[in-house]
Amino acid sequence: MALRNILTQEDPTLYKECRPVTDFNPRLHQLLDDMAETLAKANGVGLAAPQVGVLRRAVLVLETNVPEGQDEYVIELINPRIVDSSGEQEGAEGCLSVPGEYGLVKRPMQVKVRAQNRYGEWFTVEGQGLTARCFCHELDHLDGVVFTSKAERMLSQEELESGEY
């Protein structure tokens, strides 16, 4: 495994649409492993392949909604698409590619995603709360969308510190 550089919002790669993954081979597995290491090192909750300069439809999301005493775990999503969503949440959202900045973004409260795993097998996964927000955020990256374009407004440091926004 190796750490990859996370591109920042100035990089035009982040605004390009990604191509589907068609080869479920050791090269893809290496990318996913590298992304997992990069995500852990950055203390993030999600990472999309274009954020590390790879224009393929692959994302990682950290499942944080786990029972007390259980470890959070990474969900690998290849060629994902949202098949259902419900509810609404509004809150501060940030991004590893936009360090130190947060915006107020509306997202669904529950999201169901259909995707492939690293071996090409299809599965469905559901997320709620932060996980649902991450699914939406990371899948946006695959279409060249950065959260700043969806934010109702960016939050000031004072608002972040007070928690009143």
Image (spheres, rainbow, N blue to C red):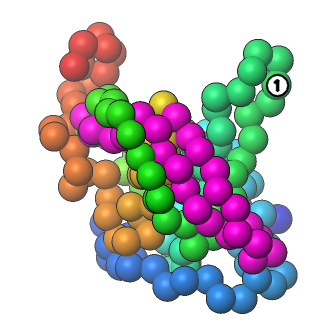
**Residue at (33% x, 41% y) in the render:** 107
Q: Where is residue 116 in the image (x, y as percent from the top left)?
A: 68, 69
**Residue at (23% x, 50% y) in the render:** 150
Q: Which amino acid, by three-letter code, is at mark 1? A: Gln
- Quarter where residue 66 is shown: top right
Nearest to the observer: residue 39 or residue 118: 118
Q: Position of residue 72 (x, y in %)?
A: 74, 34
> Would you name the residue on which mark 1 appears?
70
Q: Position of residue 104 (x, y in %)?
A: 25, 34
- Local packing at callout 1 (Cα closer than 10 Å; few below 14, some 14-19, many 20+) is few
Q: Give the range drawn in magenta.
A: 104-128
Residue 63's place in the image compared with 122, above or below, is above
**Residue at (45% x, 52% y) in the render:** 84
Res. 130 visible in picture: no
From the viewer's perspective, tell me whether residue 159 is left or right of residue 123: left
Residue 34's place in the image compared with 98, above or below, is below
Taking the magenta stretch, the answer to whether it contains residue 113 is yes
From the viewer's perspective, tell me whether residue 62 is left or right of residue 46: right
Helix, strand or loop for the magenta stretch, by majority:
strand
**Residue at (37% x, 50% y) in the render:** 98
